[in-house]
Amino acid sequence: MNQKLEDLLQLALQTPEDVRARTDELNIGFDTATQTWELIVKYHGNLDNLRILGVRVEYLIAGYAILTVPEPLVERMVELEEIEYVEKPKRYFYGAEMPTYNSCVAQVVLREPFLTGKGVLVAILDSGIDYRLSEFRKPDGSTRIRYLWDQSLLPEEETLSEGDNNTMEQGTEGRRRRRPPAGFEKGVEFDSGQINLALEAATQQEQFSLLPSVDTSGHGTAVAGIAAGNSSSYQGVATEAELLIVKLGTPDVLSFPRTTEIMRAVTYTIRKAIEMKMPVVINLSFGNTYGAHDGTSLLERFLDNASEVGRTVICVGAGNEGSNGGHVSGNLLQEPDQGSRGGERGDTESIPGGSGRGVPSRIGDAVARPVSVELAVAGYERSLNVQLWKNYCDEYRIYLRSPGGQEAQLPKMVNGGKYTLRLEQTEILVYFGQPAPYAVPEEIYFEMLPLDRNYINSGVWTIRLEPERVVTGRYYFYLPSAVVRSKGTGFYRATPEVTLTIPATAGKVISVGAYDSTYEAYADFSGRGYADANRTIGIVAAGLAKPDLAAPGVGILAPDIYGGYSPFTGTSFATPIVSGSAALLMEWGEGVIIRLR
C-alpha cells in the first residue's frame, strides 16, 4: 500500500478493468481507449520531468495539478519526491418563487445603496447557459457574458467570412482556431465579441454554427438567472453583475461533472478575474457523497486555497441528501442505560457464531456496545457501494450479513488492503484504508456487485460493529448520491446530520442550505451539518459549523431553456441566491474602498 494514494484509487488499481466498469465509482477517471488515468495531485516543485514518461501535466493553482498517466506508470509516478498525494476523480451531481422574495434582497436593491452587483464577476460553473435569453443581455441587446468556456466541445478550425476578420484573431489562410483557454487543453473558449456575433446572426442555425454551446439540461441557465438574471419580466439578485460561464465537461452517458473539471473551472475563473482586475463570486451547485465529510479531500483543500487567491468568494450548495436515507452515524460508547439512537441498534443480541460476541465492555463510565446497522437494498440494484469511516484508534470486529442470512466476518488486516467475499449471489469488494498524510480517518469501503445475475441481492443487509478497543466509538456510513441508487435503497433509521455533500464541507467556502418559505422551516431534503460535539478532526475541530446559512430553495422561479420560466427546487437553486447576494456585498465593499482612498 502507498500512503500517497487515496484508498479509492488504490482499490481501483488493484481491481481488473472489467470489474471496475461494473461499479459506479471505481472506473471514473479512467480512459479505456488510451488506458490512462486522469488524476489529481498535490505537489511541490516542478513536474515537467513527468512529460518525458508520457505523462500529461496541467498545472492548476496553489500547488495542485491534473495528470493524465498511463496506468502502468501510476506507481512509478507516485514515487516522485515532488508528489505529495494523489486522488482519482469523482462524479458530482446537480443537487417557485422569485429569488428575491423571502430573502431580504429587496432591502438593499430597492433603496439606498441600490446595489446591483455592478463591477463584480459572477461565475457559474454548471451545465452551460442559453446565452440568447434577454436575462443575460444588456439594455442594448449585447451580452453580459464576458467569457464562456464549454469544456465539452472539441477544439476545431472555423472558416471566417470577410466581414468577420476584424472581430476574430486570424490564423493562416483566413482561418481561426477554436481553442481552449490559455493553459488548458480541453474545450473551447468564447469571448463577448464572439457571443455578440452569434446573437446578431439571422437564424438559429447560424447562431449554432458560430457558437455551438448548448445547455441541454437547463440547470445552469436557471442557476445563472437566479444569481444575476435581468429582463423586463424577470429579476435575479445581482442584476448588473457581469457573467463568466463554464459548461463543465460531460465525460460519460450520465453527464455528471467530475472533480477534475471543477478544479479546472475554478482555476480558469480565478485567473480571468485577476486578469480583468475584478472581484469574483464562484457558484458551485453540486456535490458528492464520497469522502469523510471533514474537509480533508484534495478538492476541499483546493477550494480552501482558491478562496484565498485574489478577491474570491466561493458558494457551494449543501446538497439534497438530508432525507434520502444515505447516511447513518452513531457511537459504540454509550452512557449507562442510554438507549440506542440514529441508525444503530444498541442491543447485545448476538449473531450466531463466535464466543463472547455481543457482550458489552466498559470504558470508564461509558459502555461500549455492539451495534447493527441495517441497509435496505431495493430490487434491480445493479451495484452499490458503502463507505464506513471511523477513527484509527478504534478497533471493531465487523460482520456482514446478507438478506438470506449468510454472514461473514471481515478480517482485521489484509495485505494490500483489498479483500473479496461472496454472500449469496453478490460479490463484495472490501478495501481497508491505511493512515495517510491527507487522509486522517480510516475508511472501510464495500462495493457490491452481482454474480450469476444482473442485480445484487435485494432485501435487508446488516453490518454489525462489535467493540474490541474503543477510544472515540464514532462511526459514519455513507451511500452514493440518491440520484444513482434506487428509491427504496437506504439505511433504516438514517441520520440526517452530517449529510452535506462534498465540497460544501470545505472550511473556507460559503455552504448553502435550503429553506422552505411556505413552512418557514429548513427544507427536509437539504443537507444538514454537524451535531457531533465529539468529532476530533476536520472543520468541526476548527470550530466551524456548516452550512453557513440557508436561502429559499423550494419552488424558485427561474428562466428555463424553452424561453419561459419554471419553478425549481433544491439547494442548487438556493446557492445562486447567496452567490448574487455575495456580489452585492462585494460591490458595496468596492465602493467603500474607493471612498476611503
Image: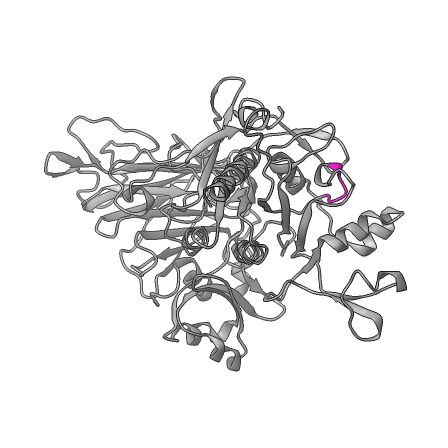
Q: Give the left or right position of residue 597, taking residue 576 as reference.
A: left
Residue at the outermost bottom position: 52
Q: Is residue 133 magenta?
A: yes
Answer whether residue 5 is visible to the viewer in this image: yes
Q: Which residues are magenta?
A: 130-134
**In the rendered view, would you say 479 is above or below 178?**
above
Nearest to the observer: residue 543 or residue 243: 243
Answer whether residue 212 is visible to the viewer in this image: no
Where, by quadrant of the figure, is residue 168 drawn?
Answer: bottom right
Residue shown at 68% from the left, 59% from the top: 189
Residue shown at 24% from the left, 31% from the top: 347
Magenta stretch: dominant SS? loop
Q: Is residue 64 magenta?
A: no
Residue at the outermost left position: 364
Q: Percent position (x, y) of residue 124?
A: 60, 45
Residue shown at 55% from the left, 69% from the top: 36
Nearest to the observer: residue 462 or residue 433: 433
Nearest to the observer: residue 571 or residue 444: 571
Number of marks drawn: 0
